[in-house]
């Protein structure tokens, strides 16, 4: 399944960086919308242990949306908005390389058939 970002996604990245996603079509990791416990890309835990600790302490944000591979997403973003992709690479390298996911909230997305 694929999603097209139609509105500014929620999150901690600067508005101009989140706006750069608008119009981009991304493949999703799952075939349906899911409910997640998210953390901030800047303020969130820096490793899996701290992520588990945040979950146990209730320091997460409930988000309904779609998971996207961060490395692929940033690569696709670089084709349209190199400066925004560079922001992700400079400010969140641990997320891009970790095998975790970017979650795009449902309200910001439109479903496309693959």
Image (cartoon, rainbow, N blue to C red):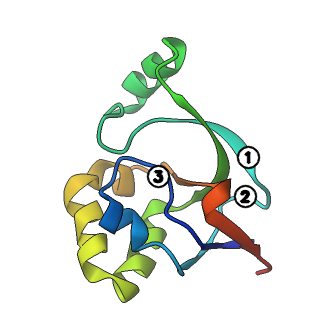
Cα–Cα gap, marks 2 and 1: 8 Å
- Specify the label residue 34 is tagged with: 1
Tell me residue 98's x, y (percent): 39, 49
The image quadrant that residue 81 belongs to is: bottom left
- Picture disc at residue 30: 2
Q: Is residue 74 left or right of residue 85?
A: right
Q: What kind of element bears circle 3?
A: loop
Along the viewing direction, whichever of 59 and 69 lies nearer the viewer: 59
Distance in Å between CA atoms under marks 1 and 3: 18 Å
Looking at the image, the residue that sits furthest to the left is: 90
- The N terminus lies in quadrant: bottom right
Residues 49 and 110: in front is: 110
Question: Is residue 92 toward the left or the right of residue 61 in the image?
Answer: left
Judge the density around disc 1: few (<14), some (14-19), many (≥20) Cα neighbours within 10 Å.
Answer: some
Marks 3,2: beta carbons within 8 A: no
Q: Which residue is mark 3?
A: 99
The residue at the point 80 percent across, 79 percent down is: 113
Q: Quadrant of the C terminus?
A: bottom right
Q: Residue 41 location in percent, x, y?
A: 36, 45
Crowding at mark 2 (Cα within 10 Å: few <14, some 14-19, many 20+): few
Q: Position of residue 50 (x, y in %)?
A: 38, 23
Q: Which mark is residue 90?
A: none
Q: Is residue 49 above or below residue 36?
A: above
The reply, left or right, for residue 57 in relation to residue 29 is left
Residue at the (30%, 35%) spot, across then down: 43
- Label 2 or label 1, whichever lies nearer to me, is 1
Q: CA distance from mark 3 to mark 2?
A: 15 Å
């Amino acid at each position: 399944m694929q999603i097209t970002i139609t509105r500014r996604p929620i999150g901690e990245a600067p508005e101009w960086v989140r706006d750069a996603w608008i119009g981009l079509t991304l493949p999703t990791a799952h075939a349906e919308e899911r409910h997640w416990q998210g953390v901030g890309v800047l303020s969130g835990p820096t490793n899996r242990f701290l992520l588990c600790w945040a979950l146990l302490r209730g320091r997460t944000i409930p988000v309904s949306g779609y998971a996207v591979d961060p490395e692929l997403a940033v690569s696709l973003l670089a084709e349209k908005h190199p400066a925004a992709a560079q922001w992700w690479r400079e400010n969140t390298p641990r997320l891009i390389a970790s095998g975790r996911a970017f979650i795009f909230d449902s309200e910001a997305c439109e479903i496309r058939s693959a």
